[in-house]
Image (cartoon, coloured by chain):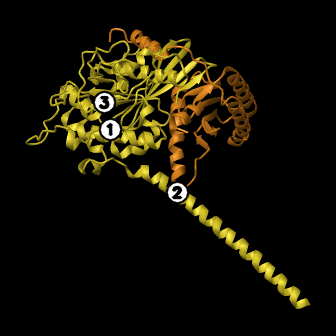
Amino acid sequence: MVQINFAAREINCKVVYYGPGRSGKTTNLEQIHATSPKPCVGEMVSIATETDRTLFFDFLPLDIGKVAGMQVRFQLYTVPGQVYYNATRKLVLQGVDGVIFVADSQRSMMEENTESLLNLYDNLKENGYDADSIPVAFQWNKRDLPDILSTDELQRVLNPKGLPASEAVAFKGIGVIDTLKSIAGLVLDRLMKEYGGAAKDRQAAPGRPGTPAPAPPATTAPGQASPTGAAPPQAQRPTSSQPAAPPASGPQPAPFSPEVHRPAAAVPTQPKPGGPPPSPVVAQPPKPVIAVEAKPPAPQRTAAPSRPEPAPARAIPHAAQKGRGKADRNKWVLWIIIGSVVVITALVYVLITVMSN
Amino acid sequence: MKDAEKLRRRRLVFYENDIKDINATLEGLLKVSKAKAALLIDIDGHLVTKRGETASIDITSVAALVAGSFASTKQVATLLGEPEFSVLFHQGKQESIHISLIAERTMLVIMFDDSTTIGMVRLYANEVSRKIEDVLNRNASTEPELSSDLGGEAKNKLEDLFKGQ
């Protein structure tokens, strides 16, 4: 949740980079850390495994300076992308104010993208959020690789409602800041809306799904972010399958739609004889290939596409329920014992009275 | 009540008067417990206020990591059938940290070394926690006043910050 500290004149917001493993979330933070002016950015903290895979989260504080008399700070987090780490992913989402979903544009990664997006929706829900009210921006990363899906395809499958999206090559820093600008605006717009700030026409601008804006939202090419963070007007609405935008009378928050198309039906996966071609080494961040082996087994990936619900996430409510059930049972046993004692005492008293007479 | 409304009510807003009172309380705590520093952070890892010797510590990172640690431990507690572990204590060779949850939305983090004891810190932490809880509950329903186009201005700031990128 946004923290507003009127004593320190500060606003603190939490933005989480979400997405499948190796999609470039940590790379986004590293680029922001490397390119930000030093007084504005703090130390980057990474809780990672020995093979540099995020274990808990990466953390980077970014101070963008005074806005309307308040110092605005963004705390940027990444989650571990691997399916196995869902419990920690859910923890990092607690208190989130905005999410950047970093998708890997490669055709072969589409199932992982879809799975991760559904998992985001599940985890937001389990954290008590109304998923539609959390600002979400998309980043189509790794646009420099061969065999990638077009942005239209990515939009259609992952972002049918056309939330703000940017193309990126994160390890070169391309598109990283565009995505950050998008989410920063959305988060603060939402804050203002919740506090009943002045209505902003900007919120009904193209790029905001759920508004009757005439121009369609779509992907922002690297370096083409408009000052408002909205999509450029020349971009085309990617699909006709988008739900009809409800009429809106005022500013709308950026709604997040969990309506992800299932990959089996929507992803134009092409069979690749002889397996997927190796990714060009020059285009990948310098991460050790061996790190792939550190990925824990993910049975969901090979199964039919279904909403992933890893065991740790289920275990928590189950254990709590079990504990509560046990407590209730103990309470009933106690009441039965007390009742029995009272009845026996009364019988003994009656018996003694009768005997004495 | 809708989820969005619930979240709005739980929003963390701190006013100048609250912070003044909290700072005075924390200073009193440091004096009597002989701890080195005391922080108040929110459960999302944002710093609320700090007192004591903090110049040599990256407080922002400490706040984020403590909040992560607390959230993680809370899940462990839930697995054991407890709602949460409301007090955490990390002991080092010289430096130690005592963390206690206050009003379910903030945490008091007390850093101390071997010039005092955990018993002393815990004793005063309990007392201070109650005082801070009173302060936090005092203005819990007050609405903040923000009257500006924050989103647009923030984007302009980011444009300036990353000019040419």
Q: In the image, residue B124 lies at what x, y percent? A: 73, 37
Residue A43 horizontal side relative to residue B91, left or right: left
How far apart marks 1 and 2 lie (CA) works out to 30 Å
Chain letter of the residue carrying label 1: A
Q: Is residue A28 left or right of residue B73?
A: left
Label 1 sits on residue: A259
Residue B34 x, y percent position in the rendering: 72, 32
Residue drawn 35% across the image and 26% down it: A209
Task: Tell which subunit mark 3 falls on.
Answer: A
SS for dot 2: helix
| Label placed on residue A24 | 3
Tint applied to chain B in the drawing: orange
Tell me the kind of residue under disc 2: Gln
Quadrant position of residue B137:
top right
> Which residue is label 2 attached to?
A321
Q: What label sits on residue A182 in the rendered view?
A: none
Q: CA distance from mark 3 to mark 1?
A: 23 Å
Label 2, label 3: how far apart the Cα atoms are? 38 Å
Same chain, marks 1 and 2? yes
Q: State yes or no: discs 2 and 3 in contact (Cβ < 8 Å).
A: no
What element does badge 3 sit on?
A: loop
Q: Does residue A321 sit above or below B148 in this rendering? A: below
Tell me residue A44's x, y (percent): 43, 26
The residue under the point 39% across, 19% down is A204
Q: Colour of chain A?
A: yellow
Report crowding for label 2: few under 14, some 14 to 19, many 20 or more residues within 10 A (C-alpha). some
Q: Is residue B8 visible?
A: yes
Query: Which marked residue is nearer to the observer: mark 2 or mark 3?
Result: 2
